[in-house]
Amino acid sequence: MSGRWLELVHPYIGSGPYCYSNALAMLLGEHAPPVGVIETLTGSPFGAQVEGAQPYFDPVGWHPEIGLDAAIELLGWRCTRTKGGSAADAIDRLRAALEHGPVLVGPLDLGLLSYRPGSGAPIGADHYVVVLAMEADVVVLHDPQGHPFATLPASDFAAAWRADEIAYAEAPFVMRSEFVRERAVSIDAALKAAVPRARRWLTGAADSVEQIAELVDARLSPDARDLLGTFGIRLGARRLADAATSLTIVGRQRAARIAIEQSRIVGGLQHPLVIGSNATLAAEIRRLGPGYEELASALAA
């Protein structure tokens, strides 16, 4: 593949479903690195996986809770993470935590956040927000997906916060509060420390890509196709583009070039998916396997 874009002069800038990274950036305030760096530190760009019959462009065994913990630690911060209990207990815990500042809450079920148009039923789509205050029995929050200072009744918030349909949620009512910066960590240092983790996350990526291609060969379910088209492809492409930019920061030029080419392939899946060209879609997906292996090799160098 040729083109000036391979020089990474023009990183992607625009909207994207980076809810937990944007939420963490809000919590870290003036000390937050660019959100693309945070996303890279979570490990999310480095692989692909299949859960049931649903493809995702993130590593085997990875999920946002693992990624958030990694990014917080790599950036030199700590926080208090709590979970479980009844809805009433969780709301009381949230109210008490807000005495120390804003709280990062999630996963929540996006379909039950009642300020969002079309809400009202759980849809199993995970989401993270920053809760700012509780005014009587009303929760005030920043939703990084376009809703600053959103409000909803505490009972509605608790229903979403149960996360009953979120596959990776090991308990309801997860929140992170009382963020403390334990040590000053530069962006360079955090990214360099993340490289060995990224290499480990790439284990199994090529096998997962083949699994995804086989699902396409056998015809993706309507739900899987819809999630890829509205969420998975654009998120995967952006993650890899941000990883390329981040790797450039620490001088890993070969790895960055491979990551941007992987991003180019993932982003290019959108059109064949939407028009139903399964043969092209499967063939393009299979191109990702060798690229993930090359990326692992470049990160090991």
Image (cartoon, rainbow, N blue to C red):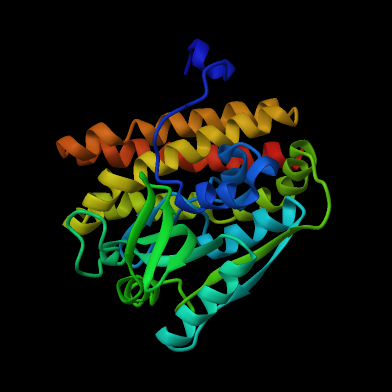
Q: Nearer the viewer, residue 11 or 240?
A: 11
Picture quarter containing residue 52? Answer: bottom left
Going by the image, does 73 lie left or right of 53?
right
- In the image, residue 224 lies at what x, y percent? 25, 56
Q: In this view, does 3 lie above or below 79?
A: above
Q: Nearer the viewer, residue 24 or 274?
A: 24
As drawn, which residue projects farthest toward the right?
183
Going by the image, does 202 lie left or right of 213?
right
Q: In which quarter of the image is the C terminus?
A: top right
Q: Which of 184 and 217 is in front in this view?
A: 184
Q: Which residue is drawn at 52% across and 24% down?
A: 11
- In the image, residue 216 lies at what x, y percent? 26, 50
Going by the image, does 88 lie left or right of 246?
left
Q: Residue at x 47, y 26 (%)?
A: 12
Q: Is residue 92 above or below residue 71?
A: below
Q: In this view, does 300 lie above or below 142?
A: above
Q: Which of 30 and 99 is in front in this view?
A: 99
Q: Residue at x 54, y 79 (%)?
A: 93
Number of dots carrying numbers:
0
Residue 277 visible in this rendered orientation of the protein: no
- In the image, residue 257 lies at what x, y percent? 59, 26
Picture quarter containing residue 152? Answer: bottom left
Residue 109 visible in this rendered orientation of the protein: yes
Q: Residue at x 61, y 45 (%)?
A: 38
As drawn, which residue projects farthest toward the front?
136
- In the image, residue 109 lies at what x, y percent? 34, 66
